[in-house]
Amino acid sequence: MKTFTHINADSVAEAVKLLAQYQGRAKLNAGGTDLLGVLKDRILPDYPEALINIKTIPELSGVAEDEKTITIGALTILADLSAAPLIEKYCPLLKEAVDTVAAPQIRNVATIGGNLCQDTRCWYYRYPDEIGGMIQCLRKGGKTCPAVVGENQYHAIMGAKKCFAVSPSDTAVALTALDATVTLAGGSGTRTLPVEELYTPLGNVLNPDELVTAIYIPKPAPAAKQNFIKFTLRKPIDFAIVSVASLTTLEQGICTAARIVLGAVAYTPVRAREAEKFLTGKELTEETASEAAELALAGAKPLAKNAYKLEIAKTLVKRALLGQ
Amino acid sequence: MKSYRYIGKSTPRKDALDIVTGRTKFIADLTVPNMLYGRILRSPHPHALIKSIDTAAAMRLPGVKAVLTHADVPDWRAGFPHHVGILDSKVRYVGAGVTLVAAETAEIAENALALIKVEYELLPAVYDPEEATQPNAPQLYDQFPGNVFPRDNLVFGPHTLNGVEMGDPEQGFAEADFIVEGTYAYENIPNPLPPESPAVIASWEGADNLTVWLGSQGPQVFKAAFQRRMGSINLVSYGSPVGASYGAKYASWQYALPAAALSKATGRPVKLVYDKAEHLAAFTLRLGSRIRGKVGMKKDGTVTAMAGDWLVSSGAYSECTQAMVAVGCGEAQLMLRCPNWSLKPQMVCTNRSASGQVRGFGGQELKCALIPILTLGMEQAGLDPVEFFKKHYIKPGDGFYWREGKWWVCTGMDYSQAIDRGAATFGWSEKWRGWLNSTAVSGAKRRGIGVGVHGNADAGEDVSEVYVRLEPNGAAMIHCGIAEHGTGQRSSLCKMAAEILQLPLDRVFVTPTDSLVNPIEIGPVGSRGTYAMGGAVIAAAEDAKRKLFELMAPKLKAPPEALETIDGMVYVQDKPETKLPWIKAMQFHGSVMGYGRFESDFSKPNFMMIFTEVEVDTETGKVELLKVVGATDVGQIIDPLSLTNQLNGCLGSAGIDSAIFEETVLDRQLGRIMNANMIDYKWRTFAELPEMEHAILESPFSTHQFQAIGMGEITPSPGPSAVLMAVSNAIGVRIHEYPLTPDKILTALGKTAPSERMGKQ
């Protein structure tokens, strides 16, 4: 691994100041579970000059509530989040999602902010430099996405135009279903936006001097049924091939509100708005769930090797809605 | 059954405490004084000529001691035939070595790589073995026209087996009630992925002295193979505890030769440790195997003829493909008693990281494609595969051609009882519903069962020589060049010697795996530890005991035949009170050396059958392995836990899971391996093990005095074809390729359009 400067930030303000000072040549280090692998494999064209350690910022950890909202500090460790009574009580689907992330050792150090901001797992993007050099793909300023004509079995089936990488974050899918927002702090102040809007086709909306500080979840209706299903080849370690989070409110068998979110199908968690609209006011049955699943994937355009993801996504939507 | 003090009893592995407390030193933990660190710059191109290499900037980097190109390295050759050098002016796969660097630290060596400038002239690449043999295909080697490796090599002597040709296939097909044909492929080139990556320290001293410390399953083989090829140097090889190998790290020249070249150039020891990316993308994989075959069968299942073209893809070079093909062809005959054969292998090179030896050694690769073709006939005849395999597995008195081309007659065992016991343990007859019928259906989930078989006659392969040294204080040292690669075989050899010498187990030792103090030893491969190496240890211990008794006889005033020994005391058998300690025979400054030799015996095949039950989610395509039962007969268990560990090891190491998710993913546009990391290369974790149970029989075997036969190598080999059968039965549709990932299942079920076929651009 190349050498770098390591700086402990004591406050959000200091972290922001350091980010601004390094003008994109520094990386934030929270849990570091992904970052160190990225550095060791030299997958990025520009190696950071400095790592800014934000674990030393005291106020960014923990789960709290007020009357309407659950607040999660960005540095909250995934294992702590999973164990938090407030999460279990109000957002069981987030707990389910957290528990599917990586493996216990990783969840003991990885943070929720880091999970939201982790880089894509696209294996072209992640190709190790030492085996013939990194791949200069579109996401790294290259001209093409090699996945389009290559090994695209894990790539996007929706919404991709040039880069076909998918967002790897399980918690982002859950948080989108929960209608969560995220607060970013930067040189020009703070801003809050829906988790759904955090991602862009080639990464995320964070400016070079910004970091995630907190996540806010509006307390869901107590009657809402929450489900999260992640499809992987292996139970531990794996990133999602497809995941689905759903939140449905039923009154006497009739669906009065539905939120359905697909993960690992696009660069961002994808709300299945047509399916949500379709379900609202209907009885939730095998047939309506299947129809909702079809609608959820209506816009999908699979590549040569990932049409199977479409089938899996439909199955997961149906199963999530029916609580199977 | 005979009762022993140690044999068949659970005893602690002698190295266990050090391993579990982290004290065991692997190569990565070793340093030698004045040591440098080596790194290899690797090719970005699957096929290219190197036009120029500018090493000047790298050489100027402080701490860099050598930068070597193909023009600078010694012409040491490896592979079958000897065709691979350390570096070449032509690269044939992404990840091929281009330049070697040695530096004061690993970081400096790594940074130096980035300063080397290489100009390439790109050549077209070919990845599919069938396309590689077409007239206009890019040619990898001038000396191998058509990209075909020669069959007429002499790896196992002048008659090395390179196919199965026997009887009159035409006549056999004419006698058949029906003929089935099919093509099946096992081409996912999995990586057996031992936890410890390849690693070496090489130290070149003076003009012609080379010492290597190797984390290899066969460290002595490096000396045996390369001493002369490196210019008749004095080569000393030290073995080290091996963080598993699964056959793959039997080969070591890929990293040992570059380290030796760097050490020769710098005059300092050089350590070279592959990281996981190199291990996955630039070391060795399983062979690719594709068979177009046909089987002639009688209605009762008797096979009258078997014929096929076996396309073997070996990647960028042949590490020992011809040897694997020879053993695979021998093993095919053990599994299928059939008078008429025509199985023709063709070994092809393509522009990907090379294939090399992995447990199953040619036979697993062959069977994963051959058994499914046989099942087409079983299906047509409506036969239970367990009964078919029982009928067709070799029996005493049957003959077969083995790897060296000689006809052997089986003097081993009829394994029918082991098959019956395995089937009963699994509950086969209760679950079997006929071909392409699921065992149970629950909503979208369908269960199926399958069975596979494998056996190897290498359990008695090759020569082993061993010395056993008795020491006056009542201890024994076994001089044997065996590396410990995770199976516990070094401990098991101690148990054998301790049993014969009746010593406490903690008074029996094995020498370090050094060529300085041991006879040449090819090591623990092909399940030969128990019979071949064990046979030599037993003979040496008996020889030592006889010599001890001869020395002691005058002192005890009894003939040597009347003596016995226990715990370092020799006594007269019918007068146990008349006894003397060993020291009285040898004096305090003496010892007794016993010598034992084992000669090759290929007449005793071992056996492994695997039964599997899977559940397939027909809506997601996910295959879950529910249950695995292994069945074998080992004659006599040496160490119960070691044996169980070997049987449980059938899952990973490019075994059963190569039917489920283990695969190396090659991008055929770039020639790059995309999943060279521990997340995208799918290996099974301990968090999801299936239910496992084994049926282990102990029918005394005509080997050595402990009547045991080894079978550790072959435990995974019947697995993949068993899973393929189980999945096909579960979903009612045949699948012709591995691994059975969701895309293939959903395609077979007609739920998604087929992806591009593997192997096509």
Image: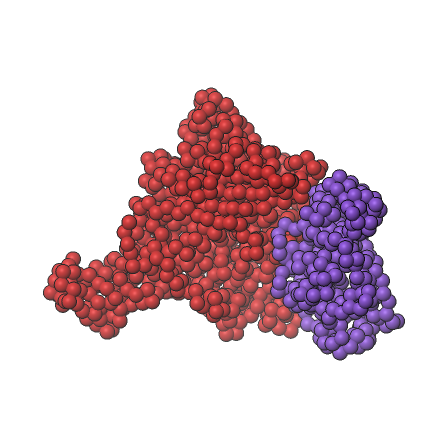
In this view of the protein, which residue sits in the foreground, B487 or A182? A182
Q: Position of residue A247 (x, y in %)?
A: 77, 53
**Residue at 63% across, 50% down:** A233
Please identify the quadrant where the N terminus of chain A is shown.
Answer: bottom right
Q: Along the horizontal axis of the image, is B429 left or right of A240?
A: left
Check the image and name the residue furthest to the front. Answer: A252
Question: Image height check: is B253 above or below B171?
Answer: below
**Residue at 49% across, 26% down:** B381
Check the image and name the residue furthest to the left. Answer: B557
Q: Along the horizontal axis of the image, is A113 left or right of B448?
A: right
**Residue at 41% across, 46% down:** B695
In this view of the protein, which residue sits in the foreground, A277 or B106? A277
Q: Along the horizontal axis of the image, is B363 left or right of B41?
A: left
Identify the hue of chain B.
red
In this view of the protein, which residue sits in the foreground, B635 or A180? A180
In this view of the protein, which residue sits in the foreground, A219 or B492? A219
Q: Position of residue B474 (x, y in %)?
A: 26, 68
Colour-to-chain, purple: A
**Residue at 25% across, 70% down:** B472
**Viewer can see residue B705:** no
Q: Disc count in the image?
A: 0
**Viewer can see residue B499:** yes
- Quarter of the rendering containing residue B135: top right
Q: Position of residue B54 (x, y in %)?
A: 68, 62
Coloring basis for residues: by chain
Check the image and name the residue furthest to the bottom. Answer: A10
Q: Position of residue A40 (x, y in %)?
A: 66, 65
